[in-house]
Amino acid sequence: MMTLKRFRALAQSYGADLQRWPQEERGAAEELSGSSEEAHTLLVQERALDEAIAAATAPQDAQHGPQSERDAALVRLRAKVAARLAVGKAQAKPVGRLSWLLGTASHSSPVRVRRFGLATGGVFAIIAGLLIGGLSGPAPAPVGALSALLQPATLDILAD
């Protein structure tokens, strides 16, 4: 059962002609408009608004040719938009792990350059650290150091 609030929202969005409403809403709307005086009154008000809009735009519509030509132009426009959307979706690249580095279409070029520079600098710092660490191996341990570490000794803290 459709609520009056939902009916009002649909009537204000699609007008009084129920054929323009979403198909899944039409049955409930017809039922409500037949049983509710307030819903019927709302449709009458929307029909008056629809007629006023049609009367105001009739001279402009007549300048653009017959209704059938306008409908055909609208169908062609919708088909071209749908085709462009399909091509855009087909060409869209999946977001990978490096998308934060390379940026996406929403990022401007300077942002990508800064991110790439930051990542490159970080990689060079890591490589330099590994090279320096590898070239300067650990200091040789004294001969008796290992045995001194393994010998039990009393802790002076607990000796009191």
Image: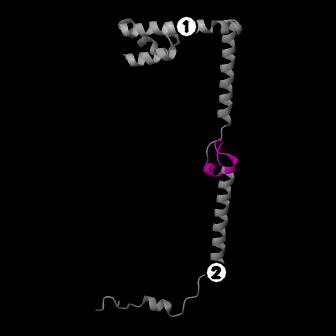
The quarter of the picture where residue 57 lies is top right
Tell me where residue 64 appears, x and y as whole percent: 70, 10
Tell me where residue 99 appears, x and y as whole percent: 62, 48
Residue extent of the magenta highlight: 96-110
Residue identifier under label 1: 52
How packed mark 1 is, by other alpha carbons closer than 10 Å (few <14, some 14-19, many 20 or more), is few
Q: Residue at x 65, y 29 (%)?
A: 85
Q: Nearer the viewer, residue 155 or 105?
A: 105
User: Against 81, is 51 above or below?
Assistant: above
Q: What secondary structure characterizes most of the magenta part? A: loop
Q: Nearer the viewer, residue 80 or 151?
A: 80
- Element carrying mark 1: helix
Q: Give the colour scheme of this rendering.
A: one colour
User: Against 120, is 19 above or below?
Assistant: above
Q: Quadrant of the N terminus?
A: top left
Residue identifier under label 2: 136
Image position of 64 (left or right of 32): right
Residue type at mark 1?
A: Ala
Q: Nearer the viewer, residue 42 or 152?
A: 42
- Element carrying mark 2: loop
Q: Residue at x 64, y 33 (%)?
A: 89
Q: Quadrant of the C terminus?
A: bottom left
Residue 24 visible somewhere in the drawing: no
Residue type at mark 2?
A: Ser
